[in-house]
Image (spheres, helix red, strand yellow):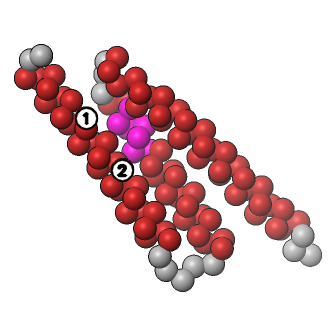
Amino acid sequence: MDQREINRQKNSRLSLALIALNTLLVLCLVVTGNLSEDESALNLLLAGIMATLLLGIFAFSYKGKAYRFGKWLFGIILLITLGYGALIWYAFQLGKAFQH
């Protein structure tokens, strides 16, 4: 392997570690605090969106077959985030319907 590919793999691992650390820090921030149920559910959704965005940037910035796992992981996280967002939207709409 040449030096350029070794540096690329090192940067890739560092990027994944930073994405995981950022997501962990956002989740810690979301969990702590005196928040209502609605606020905590929306904060979890925002944490999921942030993680999906960072992973998407990672998955599509690195080229090559070695980074195919990042694209698969991005797709799975995107589906989970969209599903959670749809569930939160449905719960809020259902809450509005039973408010009266």
Q: Residue at x 45, y 52 (%)?
A: 50
Q: The residue tagged with tag 2: helix, strand or loop?
A: helix
Q: The residue tagged with tag 1: helix, strand or loop?
A: helix
Range covered by the magenta-colored residues? 53-59
Q: Residue at x 39, y 45 (%)?
A: 54
User: x, y (%) of residue 36?
Assistant: 63, 78
The tag earlier along the polypeptide, 2 or 1, is 1
Q: Is residue 68 left or right of residue 80?
A: left
Image marks 2 and 1: residues in contact by CB distance under 8 Å:
no
Q: Residue at x 90, y 70 (%)?
A: 98
User: x, y (%) of residue 49?
Assistant: 51, 50
Q: What amino acid is found at the position of numbered circle 2 in the picture? A: Ala
On screen, residue 10 above or below 41? above
Q: Is residue 53 left or right of residue 86?
A: left
User: x, y (%) of residue 44?
Assistant: 55, 61
According to the image, label 1 marks what residue?
A: 12
According to the image, label 2 marks what residue?
A: 20
Q: What amino acid is found at the position of numbered circle 1 in the picture? A: Ser
- Quadrant housing residue 1: top left
User: x, y (%) of residue 35?
Assistant: 57, 79
Main SS of the magenta segment? helix
- Quadrant housing residue 56: top left
Q: Residue at x 33, y 55 (%)?
A: 21
Within 10 Å of disc 1 (Cα), the crowding (few <14, some 14-19, many 20+) is: some
On screen, residue 30 above or below 51? below
Residue 54 magenta-drawn? yes
On screen, residue 50 above or below 3? below
Q: Is residue 3 left or right of residue 98?
A: left
